[in-house]
Image: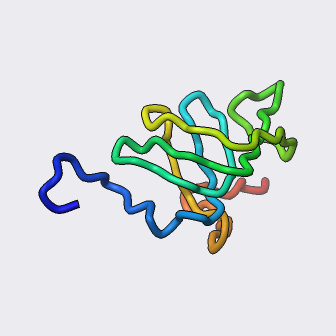
Amino acid sequence: MAGRGKESALDLAKFVDKSIRVKLAGGREVVGVLKGYDQLLNLVLDEAVEYLRDPEDPMRVTDQTRPMGLIVCRGTSVMLVVPTTGTEEIANPFQQEEMEA
């Protein structure tokens, strides 16, 4: 991209044709295979599946899914992009354990 205007802060080339999870503004979460992207962070995902939110707590995502197929995520709404493989959940080091009385 030398000599061109703006360059993206993310290098998504290593994620093309791999499964990624995308968190969008408003709390929606989608998992799919990255097929393409541009410098504005518009993403094209194939075999996309949306993880539905808990009706009682809209900020919490459930294990229920909705198949979406081929979708475009607009770059202005993309908050987080993470690969689905090679990651694991760890304990929160800042969470204080409850004291027993």
Q: Position of residue 25 (x, y in %)?
A: 54, 31
**Residue that protrudes farthest toward the bottom in the picture:** 86
Residue at the image position 53 percent from the left and 65 percent from the top:
15
Residue 2: quadrant of the picture: bottom left
Left or right, 80 with respect to 100, comes to: left
Residue 77 higher or lower than 49, as above or below: above
Q: Position of residue 27 (x, y in %)?
A: 63, 33
Is the image coloured rainbow, by chain, by secondary structure, or in one colour?
Answer: rainbow
The residue nearer to you, when weighing 82 against 11, is: 11
Quadrant occupied by the N terminus = bottom left
Left or right, 49 with respect to 32, comes to: right
Residue 59 higher or lower than 67, as above or below: above
The residue nearer to you, when weighing 58 against 100, is: 58
Left or right, 41 with respect to 24, comes to: left
Residue 84 higher or lower than 71, as above or below: below
Residue at the image position 76 percent from the left and 28 percent from the top:
57
Q: Position of residue 20 (x, y in %)?
A: 62, 58
Left or right, 86 with respect to 6, comes to: right
Residue at the image position 34 percent from the left and 47 percent from the top:
39
**Residue that protrudes farthest toward the left in the picture:** 3
Residue 90 higher or lower than 73, as above or below: below
The residue nearer to you, when weighing 3 against 74, is: 3
- Disc tally is 0
Q: Position of residue 28 (x, y in %)?
A: 66, 35
The residue nearer to you, when weighing 8 against 84, is: 8
